[in-house]
Amino acid sequence: MYKILFALTLLVGIFSCKHADQDKFTNTHWVVTTINDSTVSTNVGLYFESTSKMSFSQSANSCGGNYSLSGDQLYIELEFCTEMCCDDELSGKVDDILSPNTSLQYKIKEKELLLQGSTGKLVLELQ
């Protein structure tokens, strides 16, 4: 009997595990405030809509896809982007950092999300 209870407890623990920061991302909206150490004023932002879906708003277009967390890494897989109009230069810089199928080192510090990728870094503020 104790072996069965132990096994069930172990299985529940394994299958209910989620990343410690998952709740800090789920259903949040972050706006870019800094690109590569330069302060910017923009509406460009990231929306983490559920435990795996996200979207990225640019100046004119938007993108969407999936995300996952592992350790201090945020993995983003953009699946689509609209092409209604040309985005501004700031959106282009953010897009370069969040290029499709990318891995970014992240750190959440109070209401700031710091993202560091191979092509640059972003600071975003929780809205």
Image (cartoon, rainbow, N blue to C red):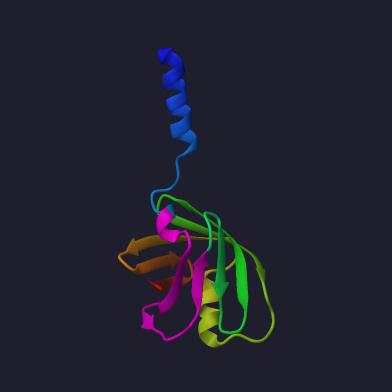
Give the x, y percent position of residue 93.
51, 79
> Which quadrant is home to the N terminus?
top left
Q: At 30% from the left edge and 65% from the top edge, which residue is drawn?
A: 110
Please say if 73 is above or below 42: above
The image shows residue 124, relative to residue 53, as above or below, that is below
Residue shown at 56% from the left, 84% from the top: 59
Query: Where in the figure is residue 114, as x and y percent of width and height?
Result: 38, 67
**From the viewer's perspective, is 32 left or right of 58?**
left
Name the outermost residue toward the top.
1
Asked if one can make out residue 47 in the rendered structure from this viewpoint, the answer is yes
Q: For the view shown, which residue lies furthest in the right direction? A: 83
> Is residue 35 in view from this perspective?
no
Residue 78, position in %: x, y?
61, 64
At a point 61% along the width and 75% down the height, the residue shown is: 62
At a point 46% along the width and 84% down the height, the residue shown is: 42
Q: Quadrant of residue 127?
A: bottom left
Task: Point out the stretch of residues depicted in magenta.
Answer: 23-48
The image quadrant of residue 17 is top left
